[in-house]
Each structure stands twice: as C-alpha cells, then as structure tokens.
Amino acid sequence: MKKAEDFSEWYNEMVERANLTDKRYPIKGMNVWTPYGWKIMRAIDTHIREEFDATNHDEVCFPLLIPEDQFAKEKEHIKGFDAEVFWVTHAGLNPLDVKLLLRPTSETAMYPMFSLWVRSHADLPLKTYQIVNTFRYETKQTRAFIRVREIHFFESHTCHADFDDAERQIREDYEIVERLARKWCIPHKLLKRTDWDKFPGADYTVGIDTVLPNGRTLQLGSIHQYKENFSRPYDIKYEDDKGEHKYVHQTTFGMSERLVGAIVAIHGDDKGIVLPPDVATIQIVVVPVLAKGAAEAVTAEAKNLYNELKGSGLRVHLDDRDVRPGVKYYDWELKGVPLRLELGPKDIEKGVVTFARRDNGEKTLIERERVTDEARETLARIAADMLERAQKTMDADTVAVDSLENLPEKFIRAGWCGGEDCGHSIENRTDRNMIGTPVDDEGFDGACVVCGKPTRTSVYIARAM
C-alpha cells in the first residue's frame, strides 16, 4: 500500500510489517508491545525522564486502582471520564463495598496523597511525574498507538503556592516540549483549547498538536492549568510564612504512546518506518558485502568497524546473517535504522565505507579513518533534515482562509472573534473540530470567519484523529 494513496491502510501495514506491536491480544485496543516497538517507546521514555529529572521533578509510581468515592470528589472530572472508565466490582466472589476503577488519568489517585504531603510553603513547589499505563474505554475504531484502550502514559503533576508560579511551570513545560520534539523530529503547535473542549476540571488546556499526512491533526499531549479546581475538593493546602492556610494551584502535563504513532506517520515512507537518530535503538547497521575469496577479510573488517563505532558510544548492530545483502537492506529500511554502512572487498581496497542514509536514500563514500566522526555528523544531519522536511510539510498543509466554503482537507487557520456561538457555528458548518488558538502571538489581523467582526485571534480547524 502506498502512503500517498491510502494513508490509513499504509499506517496499519507499516506498524505490522515493522513489528512494532501485536494487536492479536484477545482484548480489543489492548495490544502487546513487541521487542522492537518497546525499545522505541523506552527511548522516548528515557528522553522524558532526562528532561523532567533535569527540571527538578521527582518520579513517583501510584497504584493502578482508584476508589470510587475519591474519583467522585471532583464532579467535573468524573463527568468527563465516567463513560470511559473500567470498573472493578468484585474481589474474587465477594462484591466490593466501594467500587474501584482502573485509572483513566491520575488526579484522583494522587491528590488525596498530595493533601498529606503538602503542609507548608517549604513543601512547594511539589513537582512529580510518573510513566504508567492508563485505561479508557475507547468507543471509536482502535488504531495502534493512536487510539487504544490501554495507554502507555506519561503525566507530570505539580503544586504551587499561587497562580503565577503555576504559570511559570506551564511556560517551563512549553520549553520541555520544544526540546523533546526536536529529539523526535516532530513539528507541532501549542494550541489553547476552547472552553467546551478543555480537560475536565481544568481552568484551561493547551494541546500539543501535529498534522498527519492525511491532513488530520493528532494530539500528542496536553498541558493543563487547574488553579484551585482540584486542591479544594481534595483539601491540598499549605501554611504560608504568615501562618495563613491557602489552597495550592496545580498543573499537569501528559503525553502518551501516540508519540510512536506520530513518528511512524510523519516520517515513514513506502519502504517502511524512518526513525529519528535519538529514538532509534539501532542508529547504525553495518552490513558486510561478502564475495568469493574475500569473505573472511570482509567479515573481519566489518567486526573492526562495528567495535570501533560501538566503542565510541554509538548504537550499532553488525548484520552478519547468512543472507543476501539485498535482503538485509530491505529489512533495515523497513525497520527505519537511520544509517547503513556497507563494506565490501572493493571498499576495503579503496579504504572507504559506503554510507546509506535511510531518510533520503543518499549514498556517499567515506574514508575509513573518518568513519566514526562522519557517522556522528551524518546522524546529526539526518535529525536536522528530518525535522526540517516535516516542518515544511506541516507548513504546506496549513491553509489560511477567510471563508468556510469549500475547505480543503488541510489544517485550516481562520479568524475567530472568541465568541462561543461563532465557535460552535464553525464546527457545525465545517463538520470539523476547532483545535484551538495559538499560545504564541502569530500576529493575526483580520475578521471572524463567521460574524465578520475584527479580531486579532486566529483559530485552527481540522478533522482530528
């Protein structure tokens, strides 16, 4: 299946052929992480841990089960999630006095404990995160990584003395998103959701959105400002330096395994997936090209090359399988390894190694003594080029309009007065979602696409995955 012809079928086929996950588990939407897919997810988790550890967040791990009475304390929250919850009603054959649920997200699990942990202003800010599985009964058609019922999930939860400090945390989250997205070569926009589309219980929500090749948007994650909306029902208070007791202000930041789906969707081609160098657990594969009478010499030199690259800290694999080189090329292109090094008897004779880039197919001859330095530089160029190409594609798929008539299947930018009636009109007339307004000032100066009033606010509209 060609990506340009049927993106949806191409995506399903690539995920299966690259063996990233196995959907044959007997519960729909709860897929098995295969070794290769799990290594990719673990690389992403490592990036997340590095960023949050470096910004003074502490990793925690809360229980999976949440009591119904704790879940019910925040009414807006349960209203938003009650249709998606998996309930546990029995322990063995005995009905439970209080029903339990599998966490759909962890506010109602964590915040009863936060009320015990936070006592004075010296306990603030409290900055925590965890990487766990969450469970939501997805009723739409499931799709590997993008729409599942058991979700590999990152979430940070913070408590602050006041609104301004919580806002500083959110700005730090924006910076973390930017650094992480560069590692993953994913272009994105930070878009503030409408009031009717924000996270249940939030004061406001900012989505982290990218555009897929079919013109639809994919929400990679979200950042939420809670103010005191959770600290009041969960009684999370601190004593300030004047002896007064105040409710904390809270924020959260969540991302999920959708990141794997985004990498596959954005960078993959008709040969397979294409992995950013920072994500690839194998950055370089060395392929010896054997010939009669030279097999032993080529194999020995390939091992030397492998050991040299591995000793320099690069993630490298030596493919010494007894199959034709073409089979090896096909396999590693399918799996998206960023850089392939080919070494045959003629290369050894000339003192060179053939470099083959996965992202653009470019082949170059590199002098043997320069291989390690050139490999590092090439991987850096691959990452920069992948992000640049993806950003150009996203920019090309973003279309500004001043009318709602005959909209293309693109990421649409239009003027909006900010009124809820006009917002609902946009969604009803286009049968698309209002994804949100940009966090950064984009310098818009125009008119609302519905009522015609002058506005300096733009809104993005699209069909969401």
Image (cartoon, helix red, strand yellow):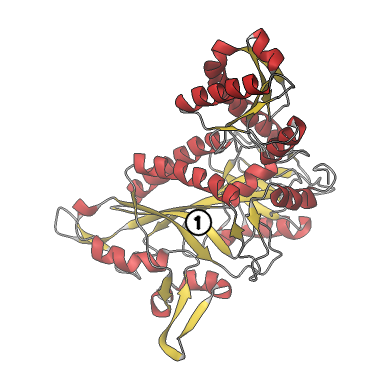
Q: Secondary structure at mark 1?
A: strand
Q: Residue at x 51, y 54 (%)?
A: 205
Left or right of 48, for residue 26? right
Q: Please tell me how many numbered marks the rendered image carries.
A: 1
Q: Is residue 369 above or below residue 124?
A: above
Residue 30 visible here:
yes
Residue 454 visible here:
no
- The quarter of the displayed image where residue 396 is located: top right
Task: Indicate the amino acid at tag 1.
Answer: Phe
Q: Is residue 64 above or below residue 92?
A: above
Q: Which residue is mark 1?
A: 153
Left or right of 69, for residue 416? right
Measured as percent of width and height from the top left, residue 395 is found at 69, 34
Q: Residue at x 69, y 66 (%)?
A: 140
Q: Is residue 372 above or below residue 393?
A: above
Mark 1 neighbour density, 10 Å: few (under 14) some (14–19) many (20 or more): some
Measured as percent of width and height from the top left, residue 15 is found at 69, 50
